[in-house]
Image: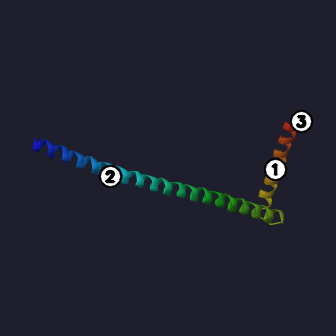
């Protein structure tokens, strides 16, 4: 009988340790999920910043071309033609 009591006590101890480990793992998981969300937010902010910088770069590049830089003159004309085609397409869609 005492052996059975010892086995049951041992099992209770092991179950208690496992439950404690489970709680610790749940806490770690929650912390990691929080870290992951923070990193995702940082990544999205960095993406938005990069897109803004790229737009500014393209705007500056276009402004420089329009101001008469000989090297970018062809590129400016192509960009203007692309914008005109896009406007024409929009007008056609609005007319329909």
Helix, strand or loop under label 1: helix
**Where is mark 2, residue-wise?**
20
Q: Residues within 10 Å of mark 2 (few under 14, many from 20)?
A: few
Q: Is residue 94 above or below residue 49?
A: above
Q: Residues within 10 Å of mark 3 (few under 14, many from 20)?
A: few
Which residue is the extreme one toward the top? 96
**Where is mark 3, residue-wise?**
95
* Pointer 1 or 2: first along the chain: 2
- At 14% from the left edge and 46% from the top edge, which residue is drawn? 6
Q: Is residue 85 above or below residue 63?
A: above
* Spatial separation of the CA atoms under disc 2 and disc 3: 69 Å
**Where is mark 1, residue-wise?**
83
Helix, strand or loop under label 2: helix
Label 3 near label 2: C-beta < 8 Å? Answer: no
Which residue is the extreme one toward the right? 95
Q: Residues within 10 Å of mark 1 (few under 14, many from 20)?
A: few
* Pointer 3 or 1: first along the chain: 1
For marks 2 and 3, give the one nearer the viewer.
2
Taking 49 as reference, is 70 left or right? right
Where does residue 73 sit, x and y in percent of width and height?
80, 61
Q: Nearer the viewer, residue 42 or 89?
A: 42
Q: Nearer the viewer, residue 42 or 69?
A: 42
- At 60% from the left edge and 56% from the top edge, which residue is drawn? 44
For marks 3 and 1, give the one nearer the viewer.
3
Where does residue 61 sit, x and y in percent of width and height?
75, 63
């Amino acid at each position: 009988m005492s052996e059975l009591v010892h086995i049951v006590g041992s099992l209770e101890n092991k179950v208690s340790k496992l439950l404690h480990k489970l709680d610790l793992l749940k806490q770690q998981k929650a912390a990691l999920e929080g870290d992951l969300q923070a990193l995702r937010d940082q990544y999205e902010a960095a993406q938005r910043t990069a897109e803004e910088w790229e737009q500014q770069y393209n705007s500056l590049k276009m402004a420089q071309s329009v101001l008469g830089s000989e090297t970018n003159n062809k590129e400016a004309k192509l960009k203007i033609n692309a914008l005109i085609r896009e406007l024409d397409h929009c007008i056609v869609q609005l007319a329909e």
